[in-house]
Amino acid sequence: MPTIIIADDNPRERAFMSQLVETEFDVKTAANADEALQLIGEDSEPLIISDIQMPGLNGIDFAERLWQQTPQARIVFYSHHADEMYIRALANIIPPETVYGYVLKDNNDETLTRAITAVFNEHQCWIDPKVRPVQARTNRSDTSITDAEYEVLVDIALGMTDNMIAKRRFLSRRGVQNRLKSLYIKLGIEHDKISDTIDNEAMNMRARAISVALRRGLLNVHELNNAEELFQQWLVERPH
């Protein structure tokens, strides 16, 4: 039987998925991405089922590292999350020749099996119907967030001022403001579309952007915690 590697930090979910596929595959399991990479070794066409949120490398970063060395690897992302931040990040790293899947964990066994069969046995991509609308939004130029815009979104979510963002991202203050303006437009909250005021004061655009981003799934607590660690590291290492 072909070998399949299941990478998930939750033991219960590793066990569930192992039982689901054990009749058709020789199963190996890993509690994180580093363990999975060790199990893959020199395999030129590994078959992987990977969680998205894991300690250390998340599932997207794991896939990027794997695909850089083995673009023929087939991965089924198996996650609780249809967050736009993951879908947009994934779109930026998929090699043209790669077959992959994205299935949410709240599906029944039949749907999970269908996704795995499509990717591993039929060499076809399989995207969860609940993920497709998010994927479509990331493919539209008027709503898709660029990497530069996403960086400034994370920075304002961390509480950074324009001046501090400029220092961290090697930009002018005007450059930061231009990125913010573009971000506000794509989030649908640009100034000329907001007419409501409270006590004659304009809405706080930064706070509004964070609110919309959270509801769109462009930000979540898990990845903000990772961003905070990088921010604290930058504060220590930055030139004064």
Image (cartoon, rainbow, N blue to C red):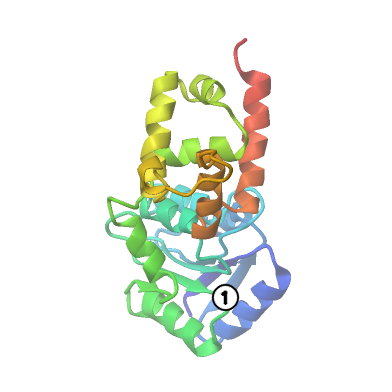
In the rendered image, the vertical position of residue 36 relative to residue 112, given as above or below:
above
Question: Which residue is located at x 37 percent, y 79 percent?
Answer: 118
Viewer-proximal residue among 56 and 5: 56
**Residue 120 seen anywhere in this rendered image of the structure:** yes
Image coordinates for residue 65, horizontal then vertical, percent: 47, 47
Q: In screen coordinates, is 239 left or right of 76?
A: right
- When the figure is inspected, residue 147 is found, relative to residue 20, above or below; the finding is above
Q: Which residue is mark 1?
A: 105
Closer-to-camera residue (79/64):
79
Please state the horizontal and vertical placement of residue 26, each as a whole percent of the image: 55, 77
- Which residue appears at 47% of the width and 76% of the height? 2
Q: Could you tell me residue 179's position as x and y percent?
A: 39, 33
Give the percent coordinates (x, y) of residue 197. Answer: 51, 46
Q: Quadrant of residue 129?
A: bottom left
Q: Nearer the viewer, residue 174 or 224?
A: 174
Q: Which quarter of the figure has residue 19?
A: bottom right
Side (left or right) of 171 relative to 41 = left
**Whether residue 42 is visible:** no
